[in-house]
Amino acid sequence: MDRFREFVKQHQWTVFCVAVGIVLTVLLLTIGFFKTLLLFVIVGACFALGYMLDQQGTEGVRAFFQRLFHKGEGK
């Protein structure tokens, strides 16, 4: 077990990328391309929302959506 931990420690990014590749392959083969793409878009949006909440709180998120959906005056 110690040899395995040492290998993972030395090659952490390789192990991580292979694990991501395996998960992505399983998702693509089981639910299809577009559902997998939708899953990543939703997860990415939730990540961005959570990151904004961590950094700026609810006021920062509210300000972001106000800027996003604000109608430009005379533009």
Image (cartoon, grey):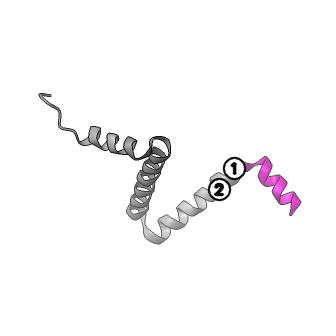
Neighbor class of circle 2 (other Cα within 10 Å; few <14, some 14-19, many 20+) is few
Task: Specify the label residue 5 is tagged with.
Answer: none
User: Which residue is farthest top?
Assistant: 74
- Tell me if residue 61 comes above or below residue 75 in the rendering: below
Which amino acid, by three-letter code, is at mark 1? Answer: Thr
Q: Position of residue 12 (x, y in %)?
A: 72, 49
- Tell me if residue 1 comes above or below residue 69 in the rendering: below
Left or right of 46? Residue 74 is left
Q: Position of residue 70 (x, y in %)?
A: 22, 39
- Tell me if residue 4 comes above or below residue 31 in the rendering: above
Residue found 15% across the figure and 28% down from its top: 75
- Label 1–label 2 contact, CB within 8 A: yes
- Tell me if residue 24 comes above or below residue 63 in the rendering: below
Question: In this orientation, which residue lies closer to the viewer: 71 or 44?
Answer: 71
Left or right of 22? Residue 58 is left
Left or right of 75? Residue 31 is right
In the picture of the structure, the residue carrying the numbered disc 2 is: 18
Residue 9 drawn in magenta: yes
Q: Residues in magenta?
A: 1-13
Which amino acid, by three-letter code, is at mark 2? Answer: Val
Q: Position of residue 42 (x, y in %)?
A: 40, 57
Residue found 86% across the figure and 64% down from its top: 1
Q: Label 2's element?
A: helix
Neighbor class of circle 1 (other Cα within 10 Å; few <14, some 14-19, many 20+) is few
Question: In this orientation, which residue lies closer to the viewer: 60 or 23?
Answer: 60
Separation of disc 1 and disc 2 at Cα? Answer: 6 Å
Question: In this orientation, which residue lies closer to the viewer: 70 or 44?
Answer: 70
In the picture of the structure, the residue carrying the numbered disc 1 is: 14
